[in-house]
Image (cartoon, rainbow, N blue to C red):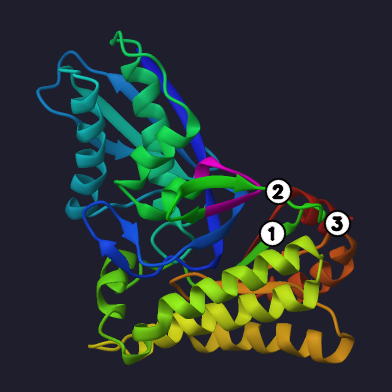
Amino acid sequence: MIVEVSAPSNIALIKYMGKIDSVGNIPTNSSLSWTLNELQTFVRISLREDFVQDQWQPLTRPGLDQVHLNEVSIQRFLNHFKSIKKEWKIEKYFLVESANNFPSDCGLASSASSFAALTKGAVEIFQKFSLRSGIGLVEMAELSRRGSGSSCRSFFHPWALWDKDGVRALEFSSPSLLHQVVVVTDKKKLVSSSEAHRRVSSSPLFKDRVERAEQRLTEIIHALKNQNWRALHKTSWDEFLDMHSLFETSVPPFSYLETASQEILDSAKALWDSSGDGPVVTMDAGANVHFLWRPDQLDQAKKLTQKFANKYRVVSCKEIREVLEV
């Protein structure tokens, strides 16, 4: 018996950074994310009668990036799988295979898509052996959150809000956005996201972090409702710089920013300064730079892509790829 599922990554404009409860991944502040349907993790789960314990290995298939997990990451992945198995009272063993169509562990939220896909796959295959009825998206998202906090947002689109009341989808009248990410580096981060969550609480800037984040959330939701693109850009920019300032002032301090990151940010800023328009820019806990474009900005997206494509890997959604091929 085999099931295969996939789940998307997501990029937060209001960041989940800092935990009240590290065991349950309870965040200190609300977060708001855009779902990245072009960045997917694929998980295949196979029943293995010959196994005496669950095992993980990379999923190998054309078009997928090879995943290299260390032993700690493998155990974290399988422990989440085992926790779901325990809830379903399943006593069989499985082979879990996974891979992404984008680089992992470099600031592209592969943890979110990986744990979301693992949770979906586990629930699907365990239901075949259990009398337990199916569960809805909200319950599945909450289950996934235990393994990776940000993964709960990957179950909803286009926007996902995660706050004290749980996680849910948000929709606005604004047009669907087009995503790009300039991959400055695909090397594994020296400081993991889990470690970053732990360290930021030592920053002197963390004291008022919740207040700043909640205020920006209000501003971003207001900007989206009123289709105020400039306000959306400004708040998103302030928010990711705030997050990186937490990293740089923590004890011990660390930084994900690279010279190339700053080069790309400077180009986006120059575009806004010269034309009064441009992409919404954000960064995750990594060196790579994300852009969100309106559909009427395809020409700008093409020019910016052409500027960086000869030096960096630029991952674009389908609509932007089609323009680039013309």
Which tag is nearer the camera, tag 1 or tag 2? 2
Q: Which amino acid does label 3 sit on?
A: Val
Q: Which of marks 1 and 3 is nearer the N terminus?
A: 1
**For numbered disc 3, what is the local secondary structure?**
helix
Residue 60, compared with residue 76, is above or below; it is: above
**For numbered disc 2, what is the local secondary structure?**
loop
**Residue picked out by circle 3:** 323
Q: Which amino acid does label 1 sit on?
A: His
- Distance from disc 1 to disc 2, alpha carbons, whole Å, reads 17 Å
**Residue picked out by circle 1:** 179
The magenta-colored residue range is: 154-161
The single residue placed furthest to the left in the displayed view is: 52
**Residue picked out by circle 2:** 171
Identify the residue shown where x is 64% and y is 82%. Answer: 264
Residue 46, compared with residue 155, is above or below; it is: above
Is residue 300 visible from the viewing direction of this image? yes
The crowd level at tag 2 (other Cα within 10 Å; few <14, some 14-19, many 20+) is few
Is residue 59 visible from the viewing direction of this image? no
Are the residues at dot 1 and dot 3 in contact (C-beta closer than 8 Å)?
no
Q: Residue 155: within the magenta?
A: yes
The crowd level at tag 1 (other Cα within 10 Å; few <14, some 14-19, many 20+) is many
- Distance from disc 3 to disc 2, alpha carbons, whole Å, reads 26 Å
Answer with left or right where residue 270 lies relative to residue 20.
right
Identify the residue shown where x is 62% and y is 45%. Answer: 157
Q: What residue type is labelled 2?
A: Glu
